[in-house]
Amino acid sequence: MSDMSGKRSAKKRGRGRKGIMIASAAVMVLALAAFLSLVLSGELDRLTYKLTDEKAVSRYSSEYDIDPYLVAAIIHVESGNREDAVSEKGALGLMQLMPDTAEWIAGKLGETYNQDSVCEPYTNIRYGCWYLDFLFSRFSSTDTVLAAYNAGHNAVRNWLSDPEYSDDGVTLKRIPYTETEQYVEKVDRAYDKYKALYPKAFN
């Protein structure tokens, strides 16, 4: 009897060890699957949130003291990272500069305006960063600057002077243009994405 009991105990221990091994293997498979999912998710996100003309973004964001991730986010939202993008309204290039705005910027920089060069990435990003610096010198918050980038700084000044849209004349509590409100939200989301996906891009 004792011999049979010992055999049954050995079988139980064997089944127990086998069960533990299977459970451990299942945990490892699940962990590997979760890891691969995160990796693939990041790679897919990078296909959507491309870091376009990284050197130009780094150079001119530094020159004009603008957060490079903000520049990358604006490029993503404005043009979908397409250097040859032209909007229905005629905005040009990566940062979607309107021709009259680009011509005004060129004049401020003491340069001769050339529409073809505005579509060239380095010029487009340089002009865009200069314009962001101009807006930051006039508005205190990033979201207000983004609203001005989209709707124009004169429109934003009018909103800030209206109690319906601003309590303090400095920050916007509400944006009257739905397009501009959505634009600010999109850039803010893209900004968070770029910081998460490219944490060492501009170190």
Image (spheres, rainbow, N blue to C red):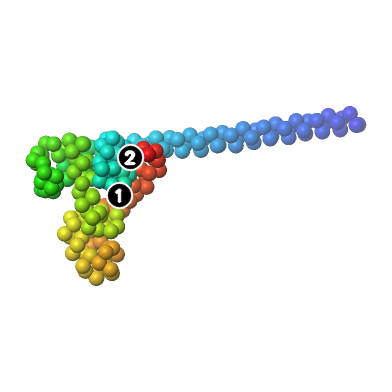
Report the residue at 48% width, 34% height from top: 36
What is the three-letter code of the residue carrying label 1?
A: Val
Q: Is residue 203 left or right of residue 183?
A: right
- Kind of element beneath mark 1: helix
- Kind of element beneath mark 2: loop
The disc, 2 or 1, on the residue closer to the chain's N-terminal end is 2
Q: Is residue 117 left or right of residue 76?
A: left
Dot 1 alpha-carbon crowd within 10 angstroms: few under 14, some 14 to 19, many 20 or more:
many
Residue 187 is labelled as 1
**In the image, residue 167 lies at what x, y percent?**
28, 69
Report the residue at 35% width, 43% height from top: 194
**In the image, residue 127 lies at what x, y percent?**
18, 43
What is the three-letter code of the residue carrying label 2?
A: Tyr
Cα gap from disc 2 to disc 1, whole angstroms: 12 Å
Residue 62 is labelled as none
The quadrant of the rendering that contains the C terminus is: top left
Q: How many marks?
A: 2
Q: Nearer the viewer, residue 53 or 138?
A: 138
Please name the residue that numbered disc 2 is placed on. 49
Residue 136 against residue 163 in the figure, above or below: above
The image quarter containing residue 117 is: top left
The quadrant of the rendering that contains the N terminus is: top right
The image quarter containing residue 62 is: top left
Residue 118 against residue 139 in the figure, above or below: above
**In the image, residue 172 lies at what x, y percent?**
27, 63
Q: Nearer the viewer, residue 73 or 186?
A: 73
Q: Is residue 7 visible?
A: yes
Dot 2 alpha-carbon crowd within 10 angstroms: few under 14, some 14 to 19, many 20 or more:
many
Q: Is residue 102 visible?
A: no
Check the image and name the residue furthest to the right.
1
